[in-house]
Amino acid sequence: MRKSLKILPVFLMLFLVGCDHMTHTEQNVLGGAAIGAVGGALIGRNVGGAAIGAGVGALGGYIYDRSVYGDYY
């Protein structure tokens, strides 16, 4: 437990720094996947729910980005 609490800030820092040079499409897809994974984990209460939620969230983030920035067909 203590070891994971020490590693958590490192992962958060890498996550924030890693998003610096992303396009708006990549940011929206990643944000949708993260929100979907959390939502799927809370609803499904297992890893399968998180994976399905991440996939649906990533697709939703992509569709949102394409509709906002005018590239949606």
Image (cartoon, rainbow, N blue to C red):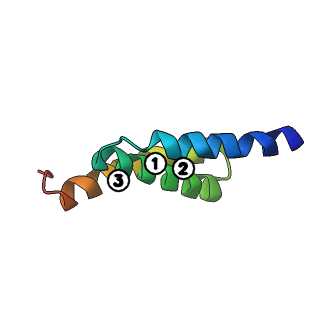
**In the image, residue 62 lies at what x, y percent?**
30, 49
Left/right of residue 66 with respect to residue 39 in the rendered view: left
Would you say the residues marked 2 and 1 are in contact, meaning their CB atoms lie under 8 Å apart? yes
Residue 1 visible somewhere in the drawing:
no
Would you say the residues marked 3 and 1 are in contact, meaning their CB atoms lie under 8 Å apart? yes
Tag 2, which secondary structure?
helix
**In the image, residue 48 lies at what x, y percent?**
59, 41
Circle nearer the N terminus (3, 2): 2
The single residue placed furthest to the right in the displayed view is 2
Image vertical order of residue 32 relative to residue 23, above or below: below
Q: Residues within 10 Å of mark 1 (few under 14, many from 20)?
A: many
Identify residue for label 3: 61
Identify residue for label 1: 33
Residue closest to the eye, 71 or 9: 9
Which residue is at 36% across, 41% downward?
21
Image vertical order of residue 44 relative to residue 21, above or below: below
